[in-house]
Every structure is written in C-alpha cells, then in structure tokens.
Amino acid sequence: MSIAHLDSRPTNVTPLPRADDVAATPHIRAVPEGVEARGFVLYVGIDEEKAAADGTDLGRIVEALKALAAEIAPSSGTYAAVALAPRGAGGRDVDVVRLALQDPAALAKHRQVPDAQDRARDGVVVDLSRKRVLLDNTAANLTYKEFELLQYLVLREGRTIERAELITALWSAGDEEAPNERTIDVHVRRLRSKLGDYEDIVRTVRGAGYRFDRHADVSVRHTSTPSPDLF
C-alpha cells in the first residue's frame, strides 16, 4: 500500500471553455498502473489553544468533518487519529501531524535533516560511537588510520603518548605501511591539516610525543561500551 497525492490545480482543457464552466476539481496524481484509490488522508494542523481561540475544539472539528464526509458520500467510512507531540516541540502544526502519523513524504524529508545535536553545536565533536569528527558541523574527511590515531590520543586525554607507543598500538608488527618514529610525525601532520583551525587539539610535546588537549569548544561523544583499546 502507498499514498498518492491530490493536485488541486485546475487541469488544462482544450478548447478553452468559459471561465464559469472551469471546475477546479482536484485530480489524483502519482497513481501507479495496476492500483486504485481507496480513500484519502486529510492532515489538519491545529493545536488545542488555537482551536479554543477559534471558538471550537478538536473533537468538534473531527465530528464536523466526519459529518461532511457522510453527507457528501454516505457510503464512505471515516477514522480519526489525533497526533500528539511534546509540549513546546515547535514546528508547523500540520508538519508535526504528518510526521506523527507516518506520512511517507514527511518521513523522507525528516530523514534528510541533520541531527539537531550536530546542527546546534560549533567547534569540534569527536564522535567515537559513530567513528567521525565534526568541525563546525561539517564532517572531517579523515582516513581510518587518522581517526584511529586521534581516538587513541582522545582516550588518553591529558597524557603524553610517545611515538613508539603510537606505532605499536596502531600498526601491526611487520606491517609494510608501519611508520618509524620519524615518519609518525608525517601521519600526525596530515591529521592536523584535516583538523584545520582546530589542529592544536593534537599537541606536540617536544622530545616526548603527542597529547590530546581538550578546549572549551571540543566535545567527545563516547560509545555505550568501552573502546577495545582502552584498558
């Protein structure tokens, strides 16, 4: 089962009749071949306070619409559902109703909207649960190894990690791509370049190694279970 849409725009007619003969009767569109229309949904967006200001209530509106449907088409059946939302949730009433009642078009649009938590926060978000880094709400294009390097430092916040430890922890023994203590600096430099204005969260401790420095504009989202490399 699926939902089609009613198009209330007047249909073009040739030859053009008199203006008072043109009927603006809605016609159903987006109906695939082999199916038939079995009814429709009318989303009505109005909360209880607005209804009271109009001198009515939701129950009376529902009953009036049901009575109108019975008058126009006595053989029709009706069913009413009230959409509930948290108080103060905001948004247009009709959009909230469509989303609450699982309108496919509203659901598709909702899925395209970024997480509110992502949109509301500036700075750096190191999301360990989803293996990503957000810089001012934009995902940083880190490679797997670059993220692993940053994660290792983040999970040991405040501690200086020696180059040798990073190599041992993040590269397997005999790995042809494993860096040495000199070339590990290249990997860190590439990571920093992708962090842009926030490169200083990876701090060089001269003669010792690297450390993750958390600033006021840095947040870390941890996983629900401990990371396998955190002991």
Image: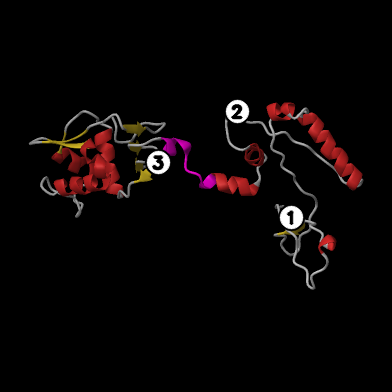
Q: Which of marks 3 and 1 is in front?
A: 1
Looking at the rendered structure, the kind of residue marked 1 is Ser
Please tell me which of labels 3 and 1 falls first in the chain: 1
Q: How crowded is mark 3: few (under 14 residues within 10 Å), some or many (20 or more)?
A: few
Alpha carbon of mark 1 to alpha carbon of mark 2: how far? 32 Å
- Circle 2: element type: loop
Q: Is residue 113 magenta?
A: yes
Image colouring: secondary structure
Residue that badge 1 annotates:
8
Q: Can residue 132 be seen here?
A: yes
Residue furthest out toward the left: 207
Q: Which of marks 1 and 2 is nearer the N terminus?
A: 1
Asked whether, in this view, residue 39 is left or right of residue 140, the answer is right
Instruction: Identify the mark at residue 95; answer none if there is no mark.
Output: none
Q: Nearer the viewer, residue 208 or 81?
A: 81
Label 1 secondary element: loop
The region drawn magenta spans 111-120
In the shown orientation, is residue 151 left or right of residue 51?
left
For mark 1, does the 10 Å Cα neighbourhood hold few (<14), some (14 to 19), or many (20 or more) residues? few
On the image, the x and y values in percent for residue 166 come to 19, 40
Q: Earlier in the sequence, mark 3 or mark 2?
A: 2
- Residue 120's x, y, as percent? 43, 35
| Quadrant of res 34 | bottom right
**Residue that badge 3 annotates:** 130
Label placed on residue 86: 2
Discs 1, 2 touching: Cβ within 8 Å: no
Cα distance, mark 3 to mark 1?
Answer: 44 Å
As displayed, is residue 130 above or below residue 174? above
Q: Which of 91 and 112 is in front in this view?
A: 91
